[in-house]
Amino acid sequence: MGDSLRNIANTIKDLDSILIFPHINMDGDSLGASTALCLALRSIGKKSYVMLDEEIPENLDFLECGCSIYDVDSYDRFDLSLQIDSSGMNRILGREAAWEKGKIKGCIDHHPTVKQDVYYDFYLTEPETAATGEIIYRLIKYLGAEITLDIANCIFAAIVTDTGNFQYSNTTRQTHEITAELYDIKDFNAKIVSALIYERRSKDSIMMEGEVLSNLEFFSEGKVAIGTLTQDILTKYGCMMNESEGIVQRIMTIEGVEVGCLIKEDDSNLVRVSLRAKHKANVAVVATKFGGGGHLRAAGCTMYISPQEAKKHLIPELIQAAETYV
Amino acid sequence: MGDSLRNIANTIKDLDSILIFPHINMDGDSLGASTALCLALRSIGKKSYVMLDEEIPENLDFLECGCSIYDVDSYDRFDLSLQIDSSGMNRILGREAAWEKGKIKGCIDHHPTVKQDVYYDFYLTEPETAATGEIIYRLIKYLGAEITLDIANCIFAAIVTDTGNFQYSNTTRQTHEITAELYDIKDFNAKIVSALIYERRSKDSIMMEGEVLSNLEFFSEGKVAIGTLTQDILTKYGCMMNESEGIVQRIMTIEGVEVGCLIKEDDSNLVRVSLRAKHKANVAVVATKFGGGGHLRAAGCTMYISPQEAKKHLIPELIQAAETYV
């Protein structure tokens, strides 16, 4: 949907400077795809940075690769501002001024729709592609840049984080074909990347997770499971909110659970909600109802109420989602 | 190492009946590869069964596919007894009489050495191949059989369980190439298989896991982590031992842990020990020292002592493994 990737590559080839925008609350796909493209662009002589306005999650720190920049005030204009793995102004919050530094604007995404509250000179979205990292891998090939070890690591991280290690239903033949090619890169070692992403949990966070899981609430005959991570629990275990990564996936391993929900109290009146579906439910609909969004089986929203109030609003919607298979 | 897969395929083509032996304490690779081959052999007109002497683990029940048999007394001799994913008599314990039903004997494995306490008319081991399921996939192609949906599911299950969802260092280009091809099979859905394997945990087992993880012991400055699952804990949560699958992998997600160990009390004086290494340690050496075996980074052994005694014997060996990188 949108412009062809080959045309986008040709457009970019003619430009000298590209500022790349992963989405807020960056994840492995968004940052991995952005950094991979930034490194490739630099390797073919372009000026490029990944524009950020928040700290990189600890388990993704290796995806920085000297690419990120937090301030473009001192820089000239860029030829292109390029949004990666999302669309719309609300996904580049805090970076609006930097976005305007680009003479032209572009967007490369894999979410179903490209939001049109931003004008894009070109855009491409591939809803059938599991990770934006796959699109960027093909773009890098079109650009004629070499897949270096750093780029391979970024692409692998993008793919595994967005496909749940190749287990989610979004995974395709292409996902595995691209990953197979990464093994041709000298010194590529999936285990090293995987360990950086998944195997740097603190003992405290494992225990915190245990507490959340031992207090799950079930509805709709066990089809809906809700976990709640409050500031009190975080304080008890000395954990940061981003150490809750993985809890919602654990919830989904329980037999019979079709819809999983983790309510994370980020502030006294701000909760972030992670939603997952196992096979058939549509949780994007629920997230959208509360101002969020995402994919059919993995979505999220932010609610400006307490965890208890959030739960009250969410329960009927989650039950409906779990009972309405799509 | 051993005979070529093509030659083995030609040998099998000339036979009429094949009895297949996965290893004891069957896992996804062993059973998945065995069933995949059995189904393929049947599809080209052979008589074939998967010979078992134990119950199939619940999360692998979908890999049965009507192939298993527990008693061959009433059957004639078979042309071939074929050991899959292991070698040596101690891996087909309880099925020795059935093994002798085969006029010729064969072995297809991916462990480093083929044990020679059994005479094999042919054998093949590919230590560089992540899963025996990959070898069987190629064998099925050589046999000229079609990859059906059931076979694809078996191969996928074999691969994901032996590669930790493509995250272990044993994963190769071939692993992804074969998996990519599975997506060509009509109705293949990785998520459905994955959910059958991983997403049928009971709430009780998740809580049991939490208790084991919250009582981990650390040695060698956190490089070694040991968890203990006693019969008391199993009873407390009403869980079966096979519901402990995954705990040792959780241990490995902790930062700094190089060697992980789970001691499972199976009986009052029998413990099963699961060992894992993250990057560099050799846990096969430790397992072998106590009469077990396995791979460099994933091994196990059975000890006929109490969990406390087992721990005493294991700790110095695990520390040495964690400090001696290979």
Image: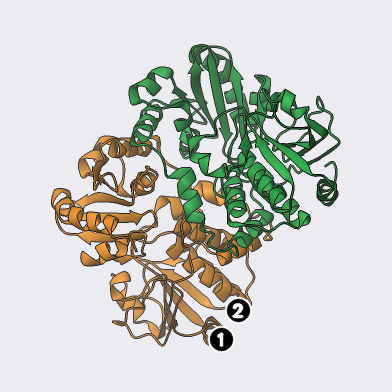
Chain colours: A orange, B green
- Pick the front one: B239 or A179: B239
Vertical placement of A182 versus B128: above or below? below
Q: Residue at x 35, y 75 (%)?
A: A87
Q: Which of the 4 image quadrants contains residue A206?
A: top left
Q: Which of the 4 image quadrants contains residue A299?
A: bottom left
- Circle 2 — which element? helix
Amino acid residing under circle 1: Asn
Q: Give the position of the N terminus of chain A as an image quadrant.
A: bottom left
Q: Residue at x 33, y 47 (%)?
A: A257
Q: Are marks 2 and 1 in contact (CB under 8 Å)?
A: yes
Within 10 angstroms of label 1, few (less than 14), some, or many (20 or more) residues? some
Amino acid residing under circle 2: Tyr
The residue singled out by tag 2 in the image is A142
* Image mark 2: chain: A
Label disc, if present, on residue A10 of the rendered structure: 1
Q: Earlier in the sequence, mark 2 or mark 1?
A: 1
Q: Position of residue B147 (x, y in %)?
A: 65, 57
Q: Give the position of the C terminus of chain A as an image quadrant.
A: bottom left
Q: Position of residue B36 (x, y in %)?
A: 65, 48
Vertical placement of A33 versus A143: above or below? above
Horizontal placement of B89 versus A141: left or right?
right
Q: Position of residue A322 (x, y in %)?
A: 28, 55
Say if residue A199 shows up in the picture: no
Horizontal placement of A268 versus B248: left or right?
left
